[in-house]
Image (cartoon, rainbow, N blue to C red):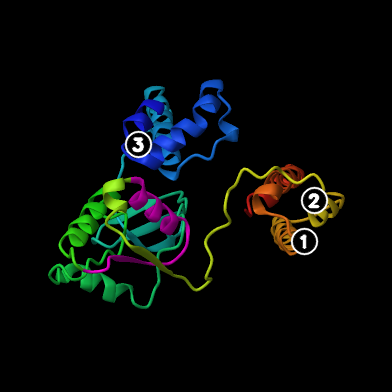
Amino acid sequence: MVSSLQARPGSLNNQWLKSYQSAMNLGNWDDIFVPRYVFGWYLKERTESLLQQATAQGYLQCELIKADVHNLQKHSETYQIDTTDGHLLNASKVVLAIGSPPNKSAFLSQLEALERSHSGNEVCCIANMYEPSQNENIKQIVKSLQANPGQAKQVLIIGSNASALETIYSLNNLPEVANLIDKFVVISPSGTFPHRITDSPASTTYVAENLDLLVQQDDFTAKQIYEAVQQDVEAALANGETINGTYSIISQGVIKALNLLSYAEQSNL
């Protein structure tokens, strides 16, 4: 993994490697803020390795089917899965691993239409930064910026979640790209980026009061854990604490609470 990072171009990538090289050499991965694509590599390799081991030992047979599912129906003892390309699949068990919900912006279809129109070099519109790939889309952005040398070069990003931050990072990571951009404009309903991860020390005074009170009860639910976390986070921010400073304390409280739940209640998560 480290060798793959070293082969990846970019000034910010090199800066990241220098910042965490000693920690990686010592194996202190818990102290490292790992880029999302690195975590993606880990999950992919981990999953493929486990599937290969399970298949080799005769525990299962695995077939990867690439499709979009638009309907799921229960029929007696089985489930019928309908895909958008017209195929039907039947299964005795179904696991919904949907991840983040898809974008439902009212104007998304308009962006996709503008992207397909290839309207000269005046506007470069990208509806999905990860399709076909981030690298390909960065090339499209560079091509558009280079085609208009006499104009102010702005990049408009709609949304301010982790993908928006990653896009800004990736564009600034390559000096030859960053030098073409005069200004980033970010539009977001919340008007804020996700909480910054900094090197500020963990809080020594913060107490997750709602979680602490909850685990002292004889019985509680997964929903109550969720509500307690919400209350503790809101209280922390109101008192000037940071997410980074309280993350470890709240995480430990959640783990403690989860371990006290019954198996049936854990399944509700």
Mark 3 is on which residue type?
Cys
x, y (%) of residue 173?
Answer: 36, 46
For the magenta stretch, what is the residue range?
A: 151-173
Q: Which residue is mark 1?
A: 239
Label 2 – label 1 distance at C-alpha: 9 Å
Q: Which secondary structure lies at badge 3? A: loop
Mark 3 touches mark 1? (CB < 8 Å): no
Q: Which residue is mark 2?
A: 206
Give the numbered dot on residue 226. none
Mark 2 is on which residue type?
Tyr
x, y (%) of residue 40?
Answer: 41, 41
Give the numbered dot on residue 62. 3
Mark 2 touches mark 1? (CB < 8 Å): yes
Q: Is residue 81 magenta?
A: no
Residue placed most toward the observer, 130 or 80: 130
N-terminal of the two: label 3 or label 1?
A: 3
Q: Which secondary structure lies at badge 2? A: loop
